[in-house]
Image: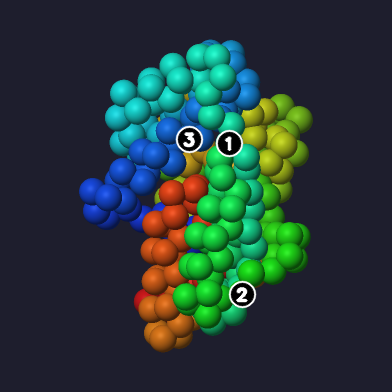
Amino acid sequence: MGRSFENRKASIFKTAAQKSKLYSKYGKQLYVVAKNGVPDPENNPALRNLIERAKKEQVPAHVIDKAIEKAKGLGGEEFASLRYEGFGPGGCMLLVDCLTDNNNRTITDVRSAFTRCGAKMDPSGSVARMFDHVAVLSFKGDNGDAVLEAMLNADVDVEDVEVKDGHVNLFAPASEFYKAKTALLEAFPKVELETSEITFIPQMQKELNAEDAAMFEKFINLLNDCDDVQEVYHNAILPG
């Protein structure tokens, strides 16, 4: 069926302030994953995968270590996961995932971003059903058939294997992420994964005109300025 995911989300960090936001984002996520499991990546696959992602985005080791050490302590902060859904400029769809220790602050900040850009928040589930929650593993190569065979041999439930632009993109249900990743690395030990994540991919995309695209970029910047926002998934295609 072919699923292009280049436009699946907007998380571009260009300035020093935005880099600080990236570090803060991973610091929270690492803390929560370590706190809710065990603060040892060898015995916590979710933590191990998150550390790998953080390193690929050049998050310093001291940020990673600090978050894990913090999770080892007694007490500490309590973060809740929140998801907001709605329609943005040009009718594009968005999911906004947050981690927060103050629900009132978070909803106020996110609602303000929606309001300032003429966007509309919708009830939970109204937009999420238009996205597929999938595991994505991507690496350089052209051996799609061999990858599919390896997944079938390992009894992994695969949704699609796409070969595009010199990359193999493997899509599987979110629940199959660790099983698929383990099977892939066992079958192809020399593979270097460029993408290894659980994400949301839109079932359909929405092309924006120049005016809507400008407002959409403003909207994304406002959301990224919210300290509690962790990920933004959307189906917008910006003008080339």
Q: Earlier in the sequence, mark 3 or mark 1?
A: 3
Q: Earlier in the sequence, mark 2 or mark 3?
A: 3
> Which amino acid is tagged 2?
Lys
Above-or-below relation of 128 to 40:
below
Q: Which mark is residue 3?
A: none
Mark 1 sits on what residue? 79
* CA neighbours of label 1 inside 10 A, class few (<14), some (14 to 19), many (20+): some
Q: Is residue 59 left or right of residue 181?
A: left
Quarter-wise, where is residue 120 in the image?
bottom right
Which dot, 2 or 1, sits closer to the camera?
Answer: 1
* CA neighbours of label 3 inside 10 A, class few (<14), some (14 to 19), many (20+): many
> Which amino acid is tagged 1?
Phe
Task: Measure the C-alpha gap from mark 3 to mark 1.
Answer: 8 Å
Task: Measure the C-alpha gap from mark 2 to mark 1.
Answer: 26 Å
Q: Residue at x 73, y 60 (%)?
A: 124
Q: Residue at x 52, y 56 (%)?
A: 232
Name, please, the residue furthest toward the left. Answer: 16
Mark 2 sits on what residue? 120
Residue 67: give x, y in percent of width and height. 43, 25
Q: Helix or strand or loop: what does disc 3 sit on? A: helix
Q: Earlier in the sequence, mark 2 or mark 1?
A: 1
Residue 190: give x, y in percent of width and height. 44, 26
Above-or-below relation of 191 to 94:
above
* CA neighbours of label 2 inside 10 A, class few (<14), some (14 to 19), many (20+): some
Q: Helix or strand or loop: what does disc 2 sit on? A: strand
